[in-house]
Each structure stands twice: as structure tokens, then as C-alpha cells.
Image (spheres, grey):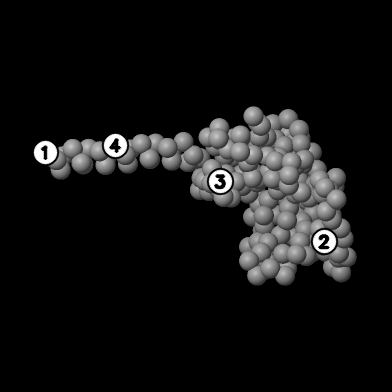
Amino acid sequence: MKKIVLFLCISLITSCNSQGKRALVGETEYQQKENARFKDASKSPLKKKDLKKFKGLDFFPVDSAFVVTAKLTRTKNAPVFEMATTTDRKPLYKEYGTLNFTIKGKDLKLTIYQSQDDTRDEKYKNYLFLPFTDDTSGNESYGGGRYMDVMTTDISEENTVILNFNNTYNPYCAYNDRYSCPLTPRKNHLNIEIKAGVKAFEKH
């Protein structure tokens, strides 16, 4: 009898824990990882009052129309420049190249950048930085734009790369003004609604 009671208790605890996790699952592995990271107080950019009420980030529905193949044209002899941020901080970046792609029949172009700090960091040396705004910015999505990470290792020999706008994220400034975030250059505005990826965050 004791074994049965113990089994039932364990089952109930497991069930409760799994229900708690399900609330943060999300539609994709990417969304699951983002929600888990934001829930973790040691990693989350959220303010304490927002973290207490956090149940998960709000995402647009996953849409394969926003997974595209882009053609990369590398920028030769690109100068290092100071990128404007939300504070006085001026991190050093370099234009890595331009990306040409099509979404829903519309030809689009974005400039992709490489952080000069990242090139000296073994963990991030293969990361490229792709900030953009679109016609949802300031409404359904964060007004300052969204970011996408692209890896140099994902660029093919033909200089093509897959861009998955479902996996875009907000700068930390969207959640907490104590962070310093790069501002999206004006030329990286897309004249289309990118209804994919993370939405604007409602602060409490």
C-alpha cells in the first residue's frame, strides 16, 4: 500500500512539473530555448517584476514563407566603424556583406555586420549580426527593430545562406533599459510586414 501511495505522489509531482514546463514550451525548439532562458533568473534580461509574471514570450505564428535563401555579396575592404547604440557606448563593427532575398514575391536587401569584439572571442568568432526593422516595427514588433544571428559556417560555397525570420529576437533594451543595444541602421528597413519571430514585449 505504501508503495502505491508513493507511486501516486511521484506521479502527481511529475505531472505538475511537466504541466509547468508545457506552459513555456513554444511551437519550436528555438522558442522553447528562448522561453527557458528568459525564465532563468540567472540569464534573463527581464526586470524582477516582469520575471515574476513571465509565462512566455509572444511569437508570431511560425510561417515557412519567412524562411528564405539569401545571396551574400561580401563587402571588400570594409572599414571598421562605431555603431550607434541606445547609450554612449560605441562598439566597433564592420560590414560583412549584403544579403539579397525574396519574400512573398518582393525583392529585399539587408546589410549584415560583424562585431570586431566577437572576432577576438573564440565562442562568438563565427557570429554575424543582422539587425532589421520592418512594417510591423513599433506596432506588433519592437520599434527598435529585431536581430538575427547568422553563422559564417552556415554560408555555402556558393555564398548563399538560409535566413529564418521565425528565429529573430528582440534586443535586450526591449525588456530592460539598463542594457546598451545597437541601433538598427536605417538602410536595414524592410518595406514589408515580417510577421514571424518574436513580438513586442508588454512590460508590467
Residue pictured at 82% horizontal, 47% vertical:
87
The residue carrying pointer 2 sits among few (fewer than 14), some (14 to 19) or many (20 or more) residues within 10 Å by Cα, namely some
Along the horizontal axis of the image, is 35 left or right of 129? Answer: left
Q: Report which residue position mark 4 lands on.
A: 12
Q: Distance between the residues labelled 4 and 1?
A: 17 Å
Residue pictured at 55% horizontal, 35% vertical:
52
Q: Report which residue position mark 3 lands on.
A: 41
The residue carrying pointer 3 sits among few (fewer than 14), some (14 to 19) or many (20 or more) residues within 10 Å by Cα, namely some
**Amino acid at the residue labelled 3:** Ala
Q: Residue 1 carries which label?
A: 1
Q: Distance between the residues labelled 1 and 3?
A: 41 Å
Q: Are marks 2 and 4 in contact (CB under 8 Å)?
A: no
User: Which secondary structure, mark 2?
Assistant: strand
Q: How far apart are marks 2 and 1 (CA)?
A: 68 Å
Q: Which of marks 4 and 1 is nearer the N terminus?
A: 1
Above or below: residue 120 compared with residue 59: below
In the rendered view of the protein, which quadrant contains the C terminus?
A: top right
**Amino acid at the residue labelled 2:** Leu
Q: Where is residue 93 in the image (x, y as percent from the top left)?
A: 81, 60
Q: How far apart are marks 2 and 4 (CA)?
A: 53 Å
**Amino acid at the residue labelled 4:** Leu
- Report the front residue among 168 and 182: 182
Q: Report which residue position mark 2 lands on.
A: 92
Along the horizontal axis of the image, is 184 left or right of 55? Answer: right
Q: Are marks 2 and 1 in contact (CB under 8 Å)?
A: no
**Amino acid at the residue labelled 1:** Met
Q: Earlier in the sequence, mark 4 or mark 3?
A: 4
Answer whether residue 86 is visible to the viewer in this image. Answer: yes
Along the horizontal axis of the image, is 103 left or right of 33? Answer: right
Q: Distance between the residues labelled 3 and 2?
A: 30 Å
User: Which secondary structure, mark 4?
Assistant: helix
